[in-house]
Amino acid sequence: MKLVKALIVDVIVTVVILLFVLTGAEAARWAVIIYTPFMLLLKLIALGAGSLTKQLKKNVPEAPEWAYHLLYAVNVVALAVHQSWLLSAMWLAIWILSYVESRRSRPVERKAAKAR
C-alpha cells in the first residue's frame, strides 16, 4: 500500500499521458501541456534547494527507484512515438533531474548507515 501511495500521482500522470497519446483526448492533452512544464520547474527548484528537499522528504514514503524509471520511460517513449517532441524532451529532462537528485541525496544515506 505504501508503494501505491508513493506513486499515485506519477501513475495518474502516466495514465493521462497514455490517454492523450492513444485517444487524442483534448482534456488529457491540456493536462499534459500544463502539468509537464510545471513538473520540470519543480524538479529544477528541488535540485537547487538540495538540503531543503531532503528535510521535506524525511516522512514521505519512498517507492523503489525502478518504479519511477519505468513510469518516466513510458512517458518519454509514448510522447516520442506520438511525435510530441517538446513534451517528450521535457519528460526526459524530468527523468534526468530526478536521477541526479536521487544520486545527490544517496551519499548522505550511506554515511548515516556507516555511522550506525
Image (tube, helix red, strand yellow):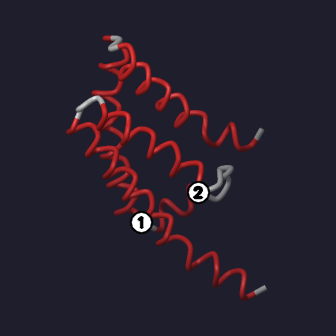
Q: Residue at x 29, y 29 (%)?
A: 82
**Position in image of residue 103 (x %, y %):** 49, 70
Q: Residue 28: which quarter of the image?
A: top left
Q: Upstream in the sequence, badge 1 or badge 2?
A: 2
Q: Is residue 58 left or right of residue 96?
A: right
Q: Is residue 30 left or right of residue 110?
A: left
- Under mark 1, the amino acid is Val
Q: Which residue is mark 1?
A: 100
- The answer to whether residue 56 is above or below residue 84 is below
**Position in image of residue 25 (x %, y %):** 35, 11
Q: Is residue 36 left or right of residue 107?
A: left
Q: Residue at x 35, y 31 (%)?
A: 35
Residue at the limit of the structure toward the bottom, as seen here: 115
Of residues 88 and 22, the one drawn nearer to the viewer in this rendering? 22
Q: Residue 106: which quarter of the image?
A: bottom right
- The answer to whether residue 80 is above or below residue 70 is above
**Position in image of residue 14 (x %, y %):** 48, 32
Image quadrant for the N terminus?
top right
Report, in whole angstroms, how far the alpha carbon at label 1 lies from the one at label 2.
Answer: 12 Å
Number of numbered callouts drawn: 2
Label 2, residues with CA under 10 Å away: few <14, some 14-19, many ≥20? few
**Position in image of residue 11 (x %, y %):** 55, 33
Q: Which residue is mark 2?
A: 65
Q: Secondary structure at mark 2?
A: helix
Q: Secondary structure at mark 1?
A: helix
